[in-house]
């Protein structure tokens, strides 16, 4: 990959907000998660700030405890396809679960988004873990945690194989001689594995970036191994710079041992900055955010990490219950991180719920303070960039108008897009078609 000092930036499109209480802000549109005009405005603002990509998370089941955004929201590829027509440069990254999606459909959907956007698509590869999801797909339970990643690896291999069905110049389009396609450059996959049997070829050709960019968010041991082996960009959720550095060096080292190209994968922690005109103004805004939250918000985060376990059944101020076994069957990375924090601080349910509801982090302050923190995390080996939540209405504009110019002045952020594709703007190499590469080797 191309090495540069530019901080990579993504924006998480999260409608009514990240938490259970964000929607209560006076300036928040309670229908923002299904408001195309709102998302179009956010996309164009992020593009004005030279962000690398927009990111849409997803979930395949809801219940009465789900956060408001997840209760009523767009399907990722649908909204990203709409936003492709409203933007020109910014990448479009969608979450799609391998647990309940067929590889052929996934390959076709993302290839279509890649063509619609001119080479700006990315796939966030996930496995489903929420307990209710299986019931929405005619199943009684998820596969065990360790098996989910074996399924994911085969699923991804099939999808990428299908994306290579067409060589770059397979579409001839010779009207004079009546040759639309060179059949020697269209390839069946003929995959037969333990989980999938897929013939191919895919019924859409390669896009300007060759293949969509692969994103992943592995934090468990299995997840980190998967990310190190397969991902080009990795999301993570460290609580501080020290935790970020540990994760960063661990995943990069795993990737290096696998022989991957230096610098891969890119590591982008998720952050929720609060930018004020001054540090004091940012503190006021932070307290405004705190004022929206309730204990239910923190308990919601806690419950979600442990398969919707009901923590109100315990003494909220007593010792934290032994729920490690539940964590092994749910969002393992989030559960492990919470349990580690509980042990370090000997926290009660109430205390950890409060922390989860109103995380502060290093990114609350005036423009200079926030820019300094971003630079420090990158230069001290904690991140290659960041995936941003908008914490309060207007915070995206504040970040773009106040922080971005400082980063550009320091030559830490592009002043304009360098390439026309997401892959190009991230500095990632163009993936050579495997069939063309094989022919080249044979010719050599």
Image (cartoon, rainbow, N blue to C red):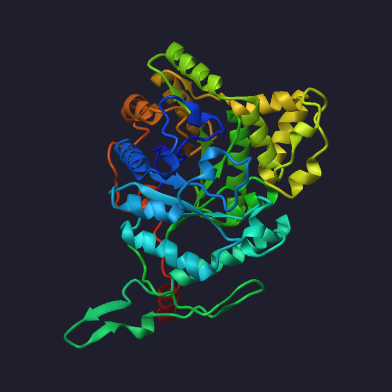
At 34% from the left and 71% from the top, the residue drawn is 168
Total residue callouts: 0
At 37% from the left and 80% from the top, the residue drawn is 185
x and y, in percent, of residue 325 in the image:
80, 45
Q: In this view, does 263 lie above or below 349?
A: below
Rendering quarter of residue 321: top right
Q: Is residue 364 above or below residue 126?
A: above
Residue farthest top in this picture = 280
At 63% from the left and 46% from the top, the residue drawn is 63
Rendering quarter of residue 11: top left
Question: 426 or 10: nearer the eye?
Answer: 10
Residue 384 appears left or right of 343: left
Name the image quarter holding the C terminus: bottom left
Question: 311 or 124: nearer the eye?
Answer: 311
x and y, in percent, of residue 248 in the image:
58, 40
Rendering quarter of residue 275: top left
Whether residue 320 is visible: yes
Whether residue 210 is visible: no
x and y, in percent, of residue 98 in the image:
58, 61
At 58% from the left and 26% from the top, the residue drawn is 359
Q: Is residue 107 above or below residue 229?
A: below
């Amino acid at each position: 990959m191309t090495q540069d000092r530019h901080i990579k930036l993504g924006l998480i499109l999260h409608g009514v907000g990240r938490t259970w209480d964000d929607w209560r802000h006076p300036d928040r549109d309670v229908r923002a998660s299904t408001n195309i005009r709102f998302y179009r405005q956010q996309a164009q603002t992020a593009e004005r700030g030279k962000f690398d990509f927009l990111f849409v998370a997803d979930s395949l089941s809801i219940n009465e405890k789900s956060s408001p955004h997840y209760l009523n929201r767009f399907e990722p590829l649908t909204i990203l396809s709409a936003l492709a027509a409203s933007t020109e440069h910014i990448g479009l990254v969608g979450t799609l679960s391998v647990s309940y999606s067929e590889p052929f459909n996934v390959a076709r959907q993302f290839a279509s988004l890649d063509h619609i956007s001119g080479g700006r698509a990315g796939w966030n590869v996930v496995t489903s873990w929420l307990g209710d999801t299986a019931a929405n797909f005619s199943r009684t339970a998820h596969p065990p945690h360790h098996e989910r990643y074996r399924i994911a690896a085969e699923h991804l291999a099939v999808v990428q194989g299908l994306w290579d069905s067409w060589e770059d110049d397979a579409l001839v389009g010779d009207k004079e001689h009546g040759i639309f396609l060179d059949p020697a450059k269209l390839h069946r996959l003929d995959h037969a594995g333990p989980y999938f049997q897929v013939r191919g070829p895919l019924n859409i050709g390669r896009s300007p970036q060759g293949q969509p960019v692969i994103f992943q968010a592995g934090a468990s041991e299995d997840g980190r191994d998967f990310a190190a082996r397969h991902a080009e960009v990795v999301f993570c959720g460290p609580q501080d710079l020290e935790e970020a550095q540990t994760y960063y060096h661990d995943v990069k080292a795993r990737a290096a041992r696998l022989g991957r190209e230096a610098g891969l994968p890119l590591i982008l922690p998720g952050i929720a900055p609060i930018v004020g005109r001054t540090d004091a103004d940012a503190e006021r805004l932070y307290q405004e955010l705190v004022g929206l939250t309730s204990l239910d918000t923190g308990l919601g985060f806690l419950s979600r990490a442990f398969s919707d376990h009901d923590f109100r059944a315990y003494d909220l101020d007593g010792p934290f219950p032994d729920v490690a076994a539940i964590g092994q069957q749910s969002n393992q990375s989030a559960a492990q991180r919470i349990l580690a924090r509980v042990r370090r601080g000997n926290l009660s349910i109430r205390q950890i719920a409060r922390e989860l509801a109103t995380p502060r982090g290093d990114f609350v302050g005036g423009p200079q303070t926030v820019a300094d923190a971003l630079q420090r995390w990158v230069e001290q080996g904690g991140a290659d960039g960041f995936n941003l939540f908008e914490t309060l209405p207007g915070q995206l504009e504040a970040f773009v108008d106040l922080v971005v110019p400082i980063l550009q002045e320091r030559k830490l952020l592009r002043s304009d897009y360098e390439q026309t594709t997401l892959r190009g703007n991230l500095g990632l190499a163009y993936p050579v078609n495997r069939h063309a590469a094989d022919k080249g080797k044979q010719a050599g």
